[in-house]
């Protein structure tokens, strides 16, 4: 009888260790201070807004522009994760006006976000001219 209760105690102890490990974040390799899904999506959105802003501000045909949502919402979704990085798909709305035209559009891009960098690895070219 005593042997059986020791096994039950060992099993319960093992279950507590496994539960504590899962709750400590082992299931999310890049979680932790300063690097969460929310942090990665915010960084990817900020990088895409900067990318679009740079393209529109340097376009010689553009008289006015903005990156506030008009017909499409800003959006970011973590699509993949590894031990080193998160892959984030983003949608960044923008609008612009030229002498002949006005347009509302959105860029779509994919970012690789690591603890130290946010890199655009694919997406739409923003070329209004």
Image (cartoon, helix red, strand yellow):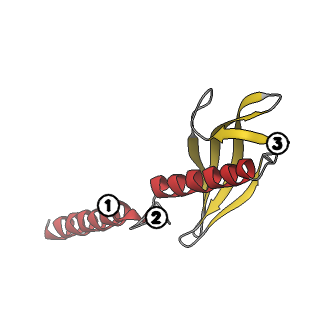
Question: SS at mark 1?
Answer: helix
Q: Are there few (<14), some (14-19), or many (20+) residues within 10 Å of tag 1?
A: few
**Is 9 situated above or below 53?**
below
- Image point 38% across, 68% down: which residue? 33
Q: Which residue is mark 1?
A: 19
Q: Percent x, y for residue 29?
A: 50, 66
Question: SS at mark 3?
Answer: loop
* N-terminal-most mark, 2 or 3: 2
**Residue 61: mark in rendering:** 3
The answer to which of 103 and 41 lies nearer the viewer is 103
* N-terminal-most mark, 2 or 1: 1
- State the separation of the CA atoms marked 1 and 3: 59 Å
Please give left or right for residue 10 compared with residue 85 in the image.
left
**Residue 36, quarter of picture:** bottom left
Q: Which residue is mark 2?
A: 35
Report the quarter where the N terminus lies. bottom left
The answer to which of 37 and 8 lies nearer the viewer is 37
* N-terminal-most mark, 1 or 3: 1
Question: SS at mark 2?
Answer: loop
- Image point 39% across, 63% down: which residue? 25
Q: Residue furthest bottom?
A: 116
Q: Percent x, y for residue 96?
A: 71, 36
């Amino acid at each position: 009888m005593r042997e059986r209760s020791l096994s039950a105690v060992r099993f319960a102890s093992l279950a507590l260790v496994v539960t504590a490990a899962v709750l400590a974040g082992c299931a999310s390799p890049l979680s932790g201070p300063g690097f969460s899904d929310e942090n990665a999506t915010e960084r990817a959105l900020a990088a895409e807004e900067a990318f679009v802003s740079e393209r529109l501000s340097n376009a010689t045909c553009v008289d006015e522009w903005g990156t506030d949502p008009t017909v499409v919402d800003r959006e970011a979704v973590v699509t993949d994760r590894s031990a080193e990085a998160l892959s984030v798909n983003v949608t960044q709305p923008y609008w612009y006006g030229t002498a002949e035209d006005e347009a509302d559009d959105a860029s779509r891009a994919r970012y690789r976000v690591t603890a130290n960098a946010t890199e655009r690895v694919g997406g739409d070219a923003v070329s209004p001219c």
